[in-house]
Amino acid sequence: MNIADLPPSDPKFTRLIHEMQPAFSQRLGSEVVYATKDMVVAELLIRPEHGNRNGVMHGGAIMAFADDLGGAATFINL
């Protein structure tokens, strides 16, 4: 199935966007739960390896997650 053949309103569209995420996104733990041309919603389960020395989420992990969503949104709109 080609993503270009699906309207963003089709639930299969979100599933395909999630399945097409690169290996880094999968390693990070990013999970796309909703995607359209106007919005990408994802979840990230915070794990100990995402933390910094102060016990909160590392800024690099936050930015990697944001970059991942920006990449997905860009891909959808190409």
Image: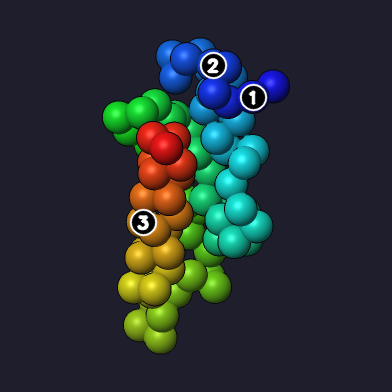
In the picture, measured across the screen, residue 48 lies left or right of residue 34, that is: right
For badge 1, the amino acid type reads Asn
Disc 3 from disc 2: Cα separation: 25 Å
State the SS at label 2.
Answer: loop
Q: Position of residue 67 (x, y in %)?
A: 39, 58
Up/down of 48 relative to 23, above or below: below
Q: Which residue is mark 2?
A: 6
Examine the rendering and report whether any part of residue 69 can be seen: no
Q: Are marks 1 and 2 in contact (CB under 8 Å)?
A: yes
Q: Position of residue 51 (x, y in %)?
A: 44, 74
Q: Are marks 1 and 3 in contact (CB under 8 Å)?
A: no
Depth-wise, is mark 3 or mark 2 nearer the camera?
2
Q: Position of residue 27 (x, y in %)?
A: 62, 61
Disc 1 from disc 3: Cα separation: 26 Å
Depth-wise, is mark 1 or mark 3 nearer the camera?
1
* Label 1 vs 3, first from the N-terminus: 1
Q: Are marks 3 and 2 in contact (CB under 8 Å)?
A: no
Q: Which residue is mark 3?
A: 66
Up/down of 53 relative to 14, above or below: below
For badge 3, the amino acid type reads Ala
Residue 2, numbered label: 1
State the SS at label 1.
Answer: loop
Estimate how packed mark 2 is, as few (under 14), some (14 to 19) or many (20 or more) residues with alpha carbons within 10 Å: some
